[in-house]
Amino acid sequence: MEILDGKKISGEMKKEIAGEVKQMIAEGKKIPHLVAILVGNNGASETYVNHKEKDCYEVGFQSNVLRFPDTISEAELLNEIDKINKNNDIDGVIVQLPLPEHISEQKVIEAIDPKKDVDGFHPMNVGRMVIGLPSYISATPDGIVELLKRYNIQTAGMSCVVLGRSNIVGRPIANLLSHKGYPGDCTVSICHSRTKNLKDICHEADIIIAALGAPEFVTADMVKEGAVVVDVGITRVEADTKSGFKLLGDVKYDEVAPKCSFITPVPGGVGPMTRVSLLKNTIKAAKKEIYK
């Protein structure tokens, strides 16, 4: 069994991106600029945004966080996004989700200029990804694909089960792994709460992507010997620890890991890859690699 070490790989990728930034500066080009929008005082969202700021600093990006109270109206937030769209100095923008209930997340996502949509959520980028055109791919699926590539995991002809059908992870990773080429050419099944004989389907899989948000859902009897298991889930649960909690993935790691050829840990697996994929999209935006 080998661990798919997202922390290690993301560190290598950050060094590569930092090198690209230095090269851009040497060529007289502007520094990539990412703006994050944070609405309200959600603790988890604040933590995520702080991590993203730190990541930007490490690779040499310019980074700003625009903080707004949760009382901001939908119209006011859309107006702020419009200002960013028109600001040629800003290469990429992310809006940290979730948003307050009175604001439509879909309206906000669609308001972002697709050229600056480094989260890869805009329908134009999703559509381009689906048909295999260059696009900004949402960070978690892109991070998973990069992890499989960097560990040279065979995907062609493999049976892949994706647990979860969210628009952020499940659907896009299923699509990416079914594309022609590497890493792709998988035969993919998307399973969810209405799937019958789920355990049997999982047990036949060469690759399992668990993205349910259900702590320790995947158990050893669902996994065949030699399978590759990618655990996307991360849930904070109460525990007898100094902090009072611990983080659990969607996979019961201790019993599943001995059966695997490769497995991601939680934390330290998919999470760091998600963050570095956002940096990768931002430098693509700065270089205008997707939209000329």
Image: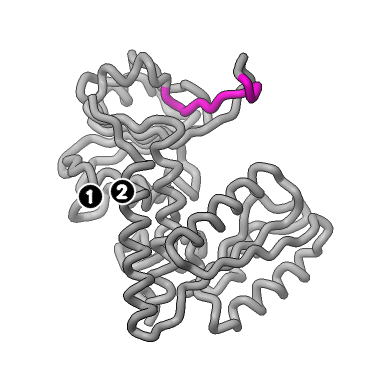
Amino acid identity at mark 2: Val
Query: Residue 109's image quarter?
Result: bottom right
Res 183 label? 1
Q: Is residue 155 something one can see in this rendering?
A: no
Residue topped by disc 2: 145
Query: What is the C-alpha distance between the residues marked 1 and 2?
Result: 7 Å
Depth check: give the residue in front, 170 or 265.
265
Q: Is residue 260 above or below residue 80?
A: above
Range shown magenta:
242-251
Q: Is residue 34 above or below residue 10?
A: below
Name the residue rendered at 51%, 64% in the picture.
Answer: 122
Residue 137 screen position, x and y as percent:
40, 59
Based on the picture, tell me whether residue 153 belongs to the magenta stretch.
Answer: no
Do tag 1 and tag 2 residues touch (Cβ < 8 Å)? Answer: yes
Name the residue rendered at 45%, 81% in the picture.
Answer: 30
Q: Is residue 221 above or below residue 274?
A: above
Q: Secondary structure at mark 1?
A: loop
